[in-house]
Amino acid sequence: MSQIFRKELNKAAAILKEGGTVIFPTETVYGLGARFDDDEALGKIFLAKGRPRDNPLILHIYKRDQLDEITEFVPPEAEVLIDKYWPGPLTMIFKKKSHISDIVSGGLDTVAVRMPSHPVALELLSLVDLPLAAPSANISGRPSPTSEDHLKEMEGRVDAIVLGGDCQVGLESTVIDLSRARPILLRPGRVSLEELEELLGPVDLYENKGEFASPGLKYKHYAPKTPLVLLEGSDEEILDFIKQNAENCVFIVKESILRACETQKCELFYPEGDLNYAAKEYFRLIRRLDSHNYDIIYITALPTEGLGRAIMDRVVRSSGGRTRRL
Ligand code: TXA
Ligand code: MG
């Protein structure tokens, strides 16, 4: 780490300790941090994002000991997941200790915790030496920021920004609730349902648990300003639709369709079999296409196994449920 960068990080840590807000890179998406134990500092996060107050925040830690200061009880399943996935893109929900602010927990008796793996995030957390509450660093409802230029919308709304290039995972962390009798997957992410079930046995899905298992699920999410429509059909039907289409639109498609469609109106979703690419690029792609004044962005589905479940979750939310069946 260069001297200049170290100085910048020290400054960011000092701002956080004094109750300010700082945007910092994580391996998933950029986060907007504030110290966890200062309600005024936490209030600045909600103000900067325009975030509804009942949507709780994730606490970020850099060492295992910090977890015991936050949570009442760490169940054995959590220890298994911690061993395998921390630091990394997995958030777990625990029963909170009573000193954790209702602003962090959105008034619930639980708290979300994650240990990020990005070296800059870990360094900043260790300099502050306190858990940091940090949602994604976007205006509420917008796609999460995964590149430095996505942070422009937050300029003037926060006290400092630490840059770290492109986020490698590109989608927010997997969120699993371990505070109940059976684990529930609240948000799919890089750590997949299949991987979790291999370690824990059956994991319930939030879809089956009623809407409010996680407050964040009831809000509009990841929406570009241009209407985004999920296209459903066989490869052949999709190709025909693209060829005949005269709208002012763009199509996000897999590589084989991109090669076959012979038009400038297609954009690469992912090279065949490379879902990591789709995850890493998705928010970047929809933010970029959103700046082109298309009337519609069409996107094709991908298989919902493994990481595909997390990508399709964001796609469906971005679309607000708009689908066109061919
Ligand atoms: O990858 C990530 O998790 C990023 C980076 C910055 O770490 N953070 C992030 O935070 O995505 P945010 O606030 O955008 O999403 C947190 C999600 C929300 O859907 C929220 O409702 C849910 O986690 N959540 C937080 N605390 C919860 C709790 N106690 N019970 C249920 N859901 C909770
Ligand atoms: Mg968010």
Image: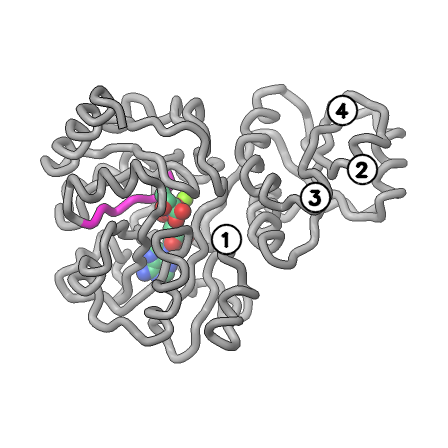
Could you say which disc has been placed on residue 189 in the image?
A: 1
Pointer 2 with pointer 1, Cβ within 8 A: no
Of labels 3 and 2, the one closer to you: 2
Could you say which disc has been placed on residue 230 in the image?
A: 3
Of labels 2 and 1, the one closer to you: 2
Residue 215 visible here = no
Among numbered discs 4 and 3, the one appearing first in the sequence: 3
Q: Amino acid at mark 1?
A: Gly
Among numbered discs 3 and 2, the one appearing first in the sequence: 3
Q: Amino acid at mark 4?
A: Lys
Disc 4: which residue = 265
Among numbered discs 1 and 3, the one appearing first in the sequence: 1
User: In this view, which residue lies farthest toward the left?
Assistant: 18
Label 1 C-beta lies within 8 Å of the nearest ligand 1 atom = yes
Q: Could you tell me which residue is drawn at 85 percent across and 30 percent down?
A: 261
User: In this view, which residue lies farthest toward the bottom?
Assistant: 181
Residue 130 visible here = yes
The image shows residue 289 at horizontal and vertical percentages of 61, 25
Disc 2: which residue = 256
Of labels 4 and 1, the one closer to you: 1
Q: Residues within 10 Å of mark 4 (few under 14, many from 20)?
A: some
Q: Which residues are magenta?
A: 131-136
Residue 225's place in the image compared with 89, above or below, is above
Q: Could you tell me which residue is drawn at 21 percent across and 24 percent down?
A: 8
Q: Give whichever of 293, 117 is nearer the camera.
A: 117
